[in-house]
Amino acid sequence: MTAFAIEVSGLHKSFGKTAVLKGLDLSVPAGAIFALLGPNGAGKTTLIHILSTLVAPDEGAARIAGHDVVRARNEVKRSISLTGQFAAVDEMLTGEENLRMMCRLSGLSGAESRVRSAELLRQFELEAAAGKRARTYSGGMRRRLDLAISLIASRPVLFLDEPTTGLDTISRRALWDMILRLKEHGITVFLTTQYLEEADELADRIAVINGGRIVAEGTAEELKARVGGEVIEFRDAADELLASIPTSGSAADVRKTLNEMAGLFPEGTRIGIRKPSMDDVFVALTGNYTNSADKKEAAIS
Ligand SMILES: Nc1ncnc2c1ncn2[C@@H]1O[C@H](COP(=O)(O)OP(=O)(O)OP(=O)(O)O)[C@@H](O)[C@H]1O
């Protein structure tokens, strides 16, 4: 494999008159966990579909493990796993039966299938539920089974399109642990997410897509450093966030911001200073707000 597991240059894709990707460039180092962040409709799923050969690009090139997604589709398909799309969990079968069936379909013998299924049930902490029908599984268990099925063939690149959407915090954290463990096996993980915390916790590198292009790429720390040195927060007496303003962190800039904001907020407003978060990065780069507190903040600032 080349140093980059995924290389994308000048990718364009339109659906009818809607231009979704407008010259997208991206490189993902082999063995990294890479997160793609972007507002709804930014083209994250479209990019995954192009990289996994489901959709052809209009222009530009993309290579997975050195193979071109248009000219070498079969080699690309043999290099990737994609969760949530192909890995069909059969509701009527148990977790173990699902895994064994998919092992057999991917060419393993009966004995090999038993061994591989047992390994995956252990790896994804599904041993206790192995004999229960998948329809009785919780959302988190189902997602883990889906991930386990997609890893049967142990391919070098794994695509996860919003792997934890809809899961509760505990299930999400459990899945994060499992994704982190995949890295130890040398798998390159490319994930899209709407949870900025997920990118922050999991990813070695993060790219932000907006307007059909990658508008920023780097480690979480590098991206946060782009927003500024310190963020000043204004909160009311009940600790509700009123506004958060990025500053360079210099005494002069902090003083200037406080002076500019003086008089805008009621008596009793509390002021705090903190380092930038991924939320700040996302807002600064895309102008989009990810939760209601941020929307309120936008309305005020
Ligand atoms: N097959 C298609 N035909 C027509 N339009 C499409 C098709 N697939 C995607 N689009 C449009 O392309 C745009 C990008 O969609 P895409 O699903 O890639 O975005 P996304 O970033 O994954 O968004 P979300 O976070 O909401 O899933 C959207 O405006 C969508 O409506």
Image (spheres, grey):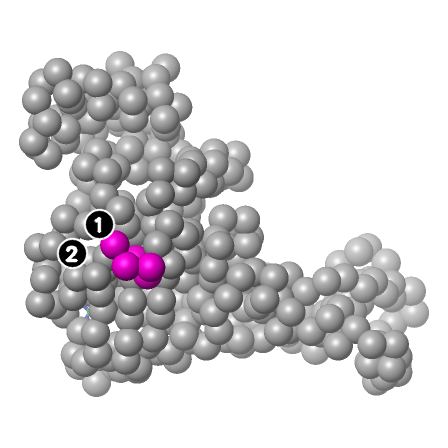
Find numbered disc 1 in the image and state the secondary structure of the residue it sits on.
strand
Magenta-colored stretch includes residue 3 = yes
> Mark 2 highlights which residue?
76
Foreground residue among 96 and 301: 96
* Mark 1 Cβ inside 8 Å of ligand 1: no
Is residue 162 rendered to the left or right of residue 277?
A: left
Q: Residue furthest front?
A: 2
Foreground residue among 31 and 55: 31
- Type of residue at label 2? Val
Point out residue 296 in the picture as x, y percentages from the top left corner: 65, 68
Point out residue 250 in the picture as x, y percentages from the top left corner: 83, 76
| Residues in magenta, as a range | 1-5
Q: Quadrant of the N terminus?
A: bottom left
Q: Quadrant of residue 105?
A: top left
Q: Quadrant of ligand 1?
A: bottom left
Is residue 149 rendered to the left or right of residue 34?
A: left
Residue 49 in view in this figure: no
- Type of residue at label 1? Ile
Q: Quadrant of residue 274?
A: bottom right
Q: Quadrant of residue 240?
A: bottom right
Relative to 55, say whether 300 is above or below. Answer: below
Relative to 132, say whether 250 is above or below. Answer: below
Query: How far, Cα to Cα, is label 1 from label 2?
Result: 7 Å
Find numbered disc 2 in the image and state the secondary structure of the residue it sits on.
helix
